[in-house]
């Protein structure tokens, strides 16, 4: 049975996110209000429900800042939102012609869940447009298909954070996601160096990870990932920060890919930050402080100065944990 649209236009915004948080590789995600993407779906005026679902049934338009749109393809099969939408359209027999307008606010390719946000906004908009009433896990499955465009593989940490908001824990098989609200005193800062990001950067960042790890490394990361979860459940920002700093597998393998990482990390900690880690696959970094540590502005200034000393321009933003994707009809 062909699906008929309930609305001719639906707009959804979805927040940026950071993944891993140290020891939680491909498992932890955190939604950030620093940036967001917006996707608007518009039913083509000539659409009568008789068109077959293929790349011709979607037309993608990408807009936004140069840092957000660079390297973003408008070909459906190479676009995160496009792949996610095709997954849903094929699954639910949607054959209309749909125009997809993507307004990119999240810097693309910088480890802030840009592809995930577009995919999440797209599937949530399609769900609303056709009144499908899909549950969150089903939306996650379709949104994660969009990650193939940027990462070359399906992963759920960023899409879960962008869809649900808050701190999320994701198990891939069988798929399940849990959202936990953050402590009230959790302060965040995201630093994004303005450096050239190669195409396929996420794939490169994954390629440097070890195929095998020592048992003691695995035990350490499991223990610290568990402590980080406990920190969120107990609303203990300092426990979260302590655990986040103790990744012994992924960060050591990737830190050479992050410009000026060691010096910026040191500057942030000296200025009162509690923890610093790579945001997703980088090159952005995530910094944690709490209200008792003083003003996050001191950390922002210290990080900005540290990049300047290295001759690197950057965007440094204080931010908070974000709510999940939201509909704007």
Image (tube, rainbow, N blue to C red):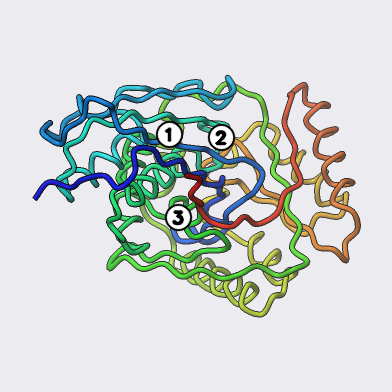
Residue identifier under label 2: 110
Q: Nearer the viewer, mark 3 or mark 1?
A: 3
Which badge, 2 or 3, is on the more N-terminal residue?
A: 2
Q: Position of residue 311 (x, y in %)?
A: 77, 21
- Secondary-structure class at tag 1: helix
How far is the residue under mark 1 from the one under mark 2? Answer: 13 Å
Q: Quadrant of the rendered structure where residue 320 is?
A: bottom right
Label 2 and label 3: CA atoms lie apart by 15 Å
Ranked by sequence position, the earlier of labels 3 and 1 is 3
Q: Position of residue 152 (x, y in %)?
A: 32, 38
| Residue at image coords 55%, 49% | 17
Q: In the displayed structure, would residue 259 be above or below residue 12? A: above
The quadrant holding residue 41 is: top left
Q: Earlier in the sequence, mark 1 or mark 2?
A: 2
Question: Viewed as shown, does residue 288 lie left or right of 300?
Answer: left
* Residue that mark 1 sits on: 204
- Mark 3 nearby-residue class (10 Å; few <14, some 14–19, many ≥20): many
Left or right placement of residue 140 versus residue 28 in this view: left
Q: Are marks 1 and 2 in contact (CB under 8 Å)?
A: no
Q: Tell me what residue is drawn at x 72 percent, y 29 percent.
A: 314
Q: Are marks 3 and 1 in contact (CB under 8 Å)?
A: no
Relative to 41, residue 88 above or below: below
Q: Is residue 286 above or below residue 228?
A: above
Q: How many marks?
A: 3
Callout 3 secondary element: helix
Residue under circle 3?
A: 157
């Amino acid at each position: 049975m062909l699906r008929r649209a309930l609305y001719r236009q639906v707009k959804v915004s979805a927040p940026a996110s950071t993944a891993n948080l140290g020891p939680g590789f491909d498992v932890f995600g955190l939604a950030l209000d620093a940036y967001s993407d917006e996707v608007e779906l518009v039913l083509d005026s000539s659409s009568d429900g008789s068109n077959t679902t293929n790349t011709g049934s979607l037309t993608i338009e990408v807009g936004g800042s140069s840092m957000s749109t660079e390297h973003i393809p408008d070909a459906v099969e190479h676009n995160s939102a496009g792949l996610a939408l095709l997954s849903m359209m094929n699954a639910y027999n949607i054959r209309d012609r749909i125009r997809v307008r993507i307004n990119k606010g999240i810097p693309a390719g910088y480890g802030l869940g840009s592809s995930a946000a577009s995919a999440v906004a797209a599937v949530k908009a399609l769900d609303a447009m056709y009144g499908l009433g899909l549950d969150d896990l089903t939306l996650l499955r379709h949104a994660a298909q969009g990650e193939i465009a940027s990462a070359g593989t399906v992963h759920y940490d960023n899409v879960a954070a962008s869809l649900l908001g808050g701190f999320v824990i994701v198990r891939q098989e069988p798929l399940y996601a849990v959202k936990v609200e953050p402590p009230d005193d959790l302060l965040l800062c995201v630093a994004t160096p303005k450096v050239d990001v190669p195409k396929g950067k996420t794939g490169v960042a994954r390629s440097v990870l070890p195929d095998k790890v020592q048992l003691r490394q695995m035990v350490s990361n499991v223990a610290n990932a568990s402590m980080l979860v406990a920190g969120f459940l107990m609303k203990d920002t300092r426990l979260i920060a302590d655990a986040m700093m103790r990744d012994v597998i992924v960060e050591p393998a990737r830190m050479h890919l992050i410009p000026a990482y060691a010096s910026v990390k040191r500057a942030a900690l000296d200025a009162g930050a509690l923890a610093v880690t790579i945001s997703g696959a980088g090159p952005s970094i995530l910094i944690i402080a709490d209200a008792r540590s003083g003003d996050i502005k001191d950390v922002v200034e210290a990080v900005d100065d540290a990049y300047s000393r290295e001759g690197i321009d950057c965007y440094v933003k204080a931010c908070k944990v974000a709510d999940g994707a939201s509909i704007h009809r």
